[in-house]
Amino acid sequence: MARKPASLSVSRETILLAAADVLRQNGYESTTMKDIAARVNLTAASLYHHFKNKDFLLLEVLRLGLDHAIQQMTPIVASELPAREKLARMIITHIVEVTNNTAVGAAMVFEIRALMNARTTNGQLQPEDAARFIAERDAFFQQRDAFEKLFRNTIREGIERGEFRAVDASIVAKAMLGAQNWVGVWYRETGRLKGEDIARIMADTFLASLIVAEPSMS
């Protein structure tokens, strides 16, 4: 089958999802732009029309997942729900999203270091493109920190309202998100439980570790 030469013959999101799947199979170092182009039946030249190089493509894969997660989380955080219900919904929403697209979830676990270590001075990029990549990468990590802050602030809110016991909100938020992101690595669609089932189990487990116990009536 002939490869599609037209630059707009495949949507940007389709390319990013395919790239995430190839990255999950091969890892960043072993993945080539040619591999990704072949997955969506594009010529390599067409793929370079969309993305300057593999580093830019990786950044966009990770940003796709993070942008979607923040969009889903923002209205929950802004709601007037009790902190315990708010946090439960945040955990469930995030895990369900990860199980709906495990390739992007796995990239958030395994390819962050590749993004941090991406080389911009090896002659592959023009100076202005290298500067743009660095700026966009820095913005991504700031956005990732902002996403973590949503969980951290919700935990602190629960502590202040007396719903949660006193804990180190920063460490607990990191532990929660680490566990949630890893679901994308081990989850299988053909497994015993569906994504929502796993999400509810994990939400119940995390909340049980935080909620202040009701006083005994004895």
Image: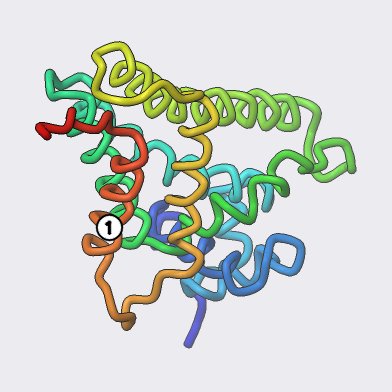
In the rendered image, the residue lying farthest to the bottom is: 1
For label 1, the residue is: 201
Image x and y of residue 97, in percent = 31, 53
Locate the C terminus and report the quarter of the image it occupies: top left
Residue nearest the observer in this picture, 170 or 196? 170
Judge whether 104 appears above or below 82 on screen: below
Image x and y of residue 196, in percent = 22, 60
Categorize mark 1 by other alpha carbons within 10 Å: few (<14), some (14-19), many (20+). few
Q: Is residue 15 visible?
A: no
Residue at 24% across / 13% down in the picture?
Answer: 161
Whether residue 136 sits left or right of residue 187 in the image: it is right
Whether residue 46 sits left or right of residue 215 in the image: it is right
Judge whether 129 appears above or below 157 on screen: below
Image x and y of residue 39, in percent = 51, 74
Q: Is residue 198 visible?
A: yes
Residue nearest the observer in this picture, 26 or 152? 152
Residue at 54% across / 31% down in the picture?
Answer: 171
Residue at 32% across / 46% down in the picture?
Answer: 94
Image x and y of residue 155, in percent = 36, 24
Judge whether 165 appears above or below 94 on screen: above
